Amino acid sequence: MTKRLFALVALLALAATGSLSVAQTFDARGWTYSNPETNWIDSVMQTLTLEQRIAQLMVVRVPLDMDDKQAKAFSEVMNGYGVGGVCFFVGTAERQAAMTRRFQRDARVPLMVCIDGEWGLGMRLKDMYSFPRNARFGALSADADSIVFRMGEEIGRQCRELGVHVNFAPVADINANPNNPVIGTRSFGTDPERVARLAIMYALGQQSQGVMAVAKHFPGHGDTDKDSHLELPVINHTRAYMDTVDLHPFRRLVEAGVGGVMVAHLQVNAYDSLHPSTLSPSIVSGLLRGTLGFDGLVITDGMDMKGITNTYRGGNAELLALLAGNDVLLLPPDVEQSIEAIKTAAVTNDTVRLLVDYHCRRVLKAKYHYVRPYVSDPVRVPGAEHLAVCNDIVTDLNINIDRRIDSIVNRAIAEHAMPGCQIAVMHRGRLVLDRCFGHLTYDSNAAPVTPNTVYDLASLTKVCATTLAVMKLVDKGLIRIDDKLSRHLSYLNGTDKASITVKQALSHCSGLKAYDALWKLTSERDSIPLLVAASQLNADKSYCYSDFGFILLADMVERITGQPLDDYVEEQFFDPMGLASTDFNPIDAGFDTSRIAPTEVDSLRGLIRGTVHDPNAYAMDGVSGHAGLFSTAADVARLMQMVLNGGVLDGHRYLREKTVETFTSRHYEKQGNRRALGFDKPLLVPSANAQVCPEASQASFGHTGFTGTMVWADPECDLVYVFLSNRVYPSATPNRLAQMNVRTDIQALLYSDIRK
């Protein structure tokens, strides 16, 4: 015992040499140095007796189902001892809030209020929200780790409102033993680095709200087949194994700045074959403090667990835990006995007395940062607004771990429906999915699709450029949707197209033909609109999807603004939105060809890459109202989110809400035309083989593109879905992507995940 205490005192002296943050002032007396943290700790220490300093190290269990009278008596007893904190385990949020207010009001030193809420307050409080277990979050891909941060952040936010300062989470154990009776789905998984990353996300999210995160169960409870609540598990791994596996998440959490570490009740023979890890100086002071360099709060696992009480009684375990280097003695089964055992040792041994003071100061330091700043805040039950946040987080989780999406995409790639694709999903204004699959071509050495891969959007140009430009002109009062195109395009006067309105062209009911190979008739860009003007009209003006109307609309934009379509939309939308990967003629815009997905291998043009696939748009130098725009899925998602938001993105208004409403509504529904103005809409009678899944609401809108693209927004679910591919490589036929319903089947899964 003497040698162990000597080593501990030496360790404490070494720790005391660390630098302190001080404030310096100068007056007639010279320099004065003060440290607010040290001053507060000193002032509290001066008010505490030896017994109260010992009691500050203890966090006690709040008994179940106390009435007001019992809660008052409990508070008086615990305040009499001067305990450092309380831990809640069961009940309702309202009851916990009421008792917290009472306990804090009665306490001489602010109490550290703790909870063991690994998956949220609902783990303990029956009227609060419970997130899924960590194992489900462990299924996330690496690019979605931020969802775990958001979970930790929200749990921290709810803890803060309820007056909780410390949450005993995250679990940093590796789920290495399928027979483990106590860890299992509480772990993030089996890979040490993956567990480390997600545990860090959780801890940092929680601590961003001022609530201490506590990594547990050190040095690793994952590979056991016994429950330390009932008996003492034994671990026989080598130090080398533990360093690589069990200790890895804890090391990374220490480096990331986790506030607390909980030491488990384990027999870890590689480090100490005589003592449980909680009572082992080699593990607590040597491994955790010394080797890992942890300087936060060290907390024992519950001292009332049978892994300890089966062997140690009468306060001896609490004394040994203190001597091992723990700061907080959690849930001592008998507070009075524990205080007495430590006091007796402290009275007869100055080293123990020094340890009491040292660890009391460490507890007060933690209180200075995690309790004192918030002790005057009102304690209240987290409101209903938190439920929406929690539901959003779980929805984003469901979308990101839905392996059915991977299955659909991988099957499409295997059957050469496309070489690869990007999928982006925004839900409630957040980019919750930005996934890449496959490669740019089917070649074995082809580059993989990345978030920076740029795709030819084909007819998505109609809504992502031309329609937006027309909406802007309406906003500025430069046109009306009932204007005749001939008012702005004089070459239409005297033709059978003189009476076509802007609204008719946008809705594909102008009588214009669907398509013709105009590029074969001219190599002059400006001649294409004139050829449209000279083309033969359909016999009636019933619905006929037409590129020609959008060629004329783009020409109208250019003549009214004095700017080509590409320059106008870049100035009005793309640049201010920060859409750096969105442009016409991407090679001319400075995009590296290697990041542009190729389209068709054409008999005249060869491999088409970086120039527009559509031949009429190509004849117009790559800038047309019906095709020519290139972009990434994430950029397109932001653009459509602006429309879904009623014309606003990131606090900036791009379009009037009334204009958005007008353009995303049908105007010829009575004529059987499903289209809005520029935007496509679901079929009037939904079908499983339509351009949009049957689950999409009638309020939804979007567009598809010939190259294998799709964008769709649904205001009823606040959902934006973008699918980009180069399904036309190396040949546009057959269209297996459409035949396999790839885009719409994925869209249907998104609705399923959102509505879970």
Image (tube, helix red, strand yellow):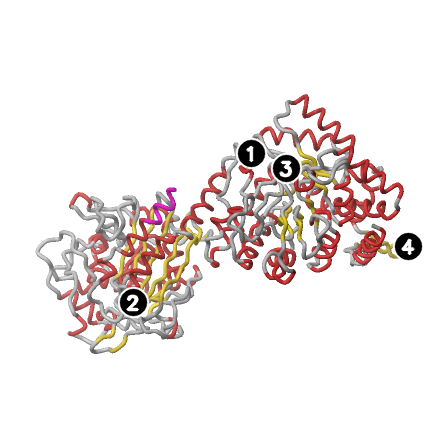
Marks 3 and 1 sit apart, C-alpha to C-alpha, by 14 Å
Question: Which of pointers 4 and 1 lies earlier in the amino acid sequence?
Answer: 4
The image quadrant where one finds the C terminus is top left
Residue furthest to the right: 29
Q: Nearer the viewer, residue 535 or 138?
A: 138
Residue at 55% over, 59% down: 193
Q: Secondary structure at mark 3?
A: loop
Q: Check disc 2 and report the residue beneath it.
A: 628
x and y, in percent, of residue 699 in the image = 30, 44
Q: Position of residue 554 (x, y in %)?
A: 27, 63
State whether residue 153 is above or below residue 411. Answer: above
Q: Is residue 753 magenta?
A: yes
Q: Nearer the viewer, mark 4 or mark 1?
A: 1
Which stretch appears magenta? 749-756
Q: CA distance from mark 4 to mark 2?
A: 76 Å
Q: Residues within 10 Å of mark 2 (few under 14, many from 20)?
A: many
Q: Residue 28: which numbered mark, if any?
A: 4
The amino acid beneath tag 1 is Leu
- Residue 24: in sight, yes or no? no
| Vertical position of residue 368 compared to residue 271: above or below | above
- Residue assigned mark 1: 125
Q: Mark 4 or mark 2: which comes first in sequence?
A: 4
Vertical arrangement, residue 109 with respect to residue 460, above or below: above
Q: First in sequence: mark 2 or mark 1?
A: 1
As drawn, 1 above or below 516: above
Q: Secondary structure at mark 1?
A: loop
Please give the residue where the numbered disc 3 appears in the rendered image: 163
